[in-house]
Image (cartoon, rainbow, N blue to C red):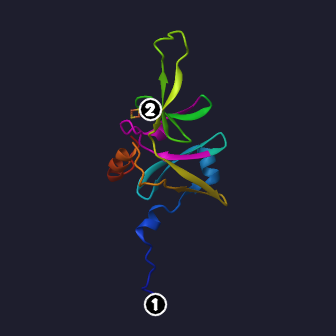
């Protein structure tokens, strides 16, 4: 019967890997943006590794795909172009510089504010790159902007 189709339950669909581009292309451009199950994400290729996270900064929705990558304590971080928040690519932690007022001469140390930006799993299979959304039942600070920008589409600013 030509009219029959297989129904895939929503739950299965929502966490299935989504093809985002060719490995070679992303290695060359170093970053791309993509829609993964209605969610705007950015995929980075940095020093031999792929990373994916929500595209809108957890702080106020800044465009992380336009930020610079910097190493902080050996962890690659994206610097949000809007207010310069630093977010680790691997885990989505927000970093801040802690200054101990009782030791004013000490160099400020980088500390984590905890996981703020939702990261997603990247897999490469036979030259194709896929993003698998992380578990959406566990909420994350960046979810608010991920939802908000979902409706307005993917303009660059
Ligand atoms: Fe990213 Fe404020 S929106 S630092």
User: Residue 39: x and y, percent?
Assistant: 42, 53
State the image quarter where residue 22 is shown: bottom right
Q: Mark 1 points at which residue?
A: 1
How many numbered markers are drawn?
2
For label 1, count other residues whose C-alpha is less than 10 Å away and answer few (under 14), some (14-19) or many (20+).
few
Q: What element carries label 1?
A: loop
Q: Mark 2 points at which residue?
A: 81
Residue located at (60% from left, 28% from top) = 73
What's the distance in space between the residues labelled 2 and 1, CA to CA?
54 Å
User: Residue 122: x and y, percent?
Assistant: 57, 52
**What is the magenta range?**
50-72
User: Residue 119: x and y, percent?
Assistant: 50, 46
Up/down of 137 relative to 46, above or below: below
Indicate yes or no: mark 2 CB to ligand 1 under 8 Å: yes
Indicate yes or no: mark 1 CB to ligand 1 under 8 Å: no
Residue projecting furthest to the front: 102
Image quarter of the C terminus: top left
Q: What element carries label 2?
A: loop
Up/down of 75 relative to 53, above or below: above
Specify whether residue 59 is painted magenta. Answer: yes
Up/down of 5 relative to 78, above or below: below
């Amino acid at each position: 019967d030509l009219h029959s189709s297989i129904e895939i339950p929503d739950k299965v669909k929502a966490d299935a890997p989504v093809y985002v581009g060719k490995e070679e292309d992303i290695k060359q451009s170093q970053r791309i943006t993509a829609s993964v199950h209605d969610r705007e994400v950015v995929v980075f290729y940095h020093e031999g590794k792929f990373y994916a996270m929500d595209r809108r900064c957890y702080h106020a929705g800044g465009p992380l795909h336009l930020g610079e990558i910097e190493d902080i304590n050996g962890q690659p971080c994206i610097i949000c172009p809007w207010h310069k928040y630093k977010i680790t690519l691997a885990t989505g932690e927000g970093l801040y510089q802690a200054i101990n007022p009782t030791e004013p001469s000490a160099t400020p140390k980088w500390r984590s504010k905890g996981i703020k930006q939702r990261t997603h799993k990247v897999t490469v299979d036979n030259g194709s790159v896929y993003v698998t959304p992380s578990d959406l039942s566990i909420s994350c600070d960046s979810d608010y902007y991920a939802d908000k920008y979902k409706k307005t589409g993917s303009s660059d600013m």
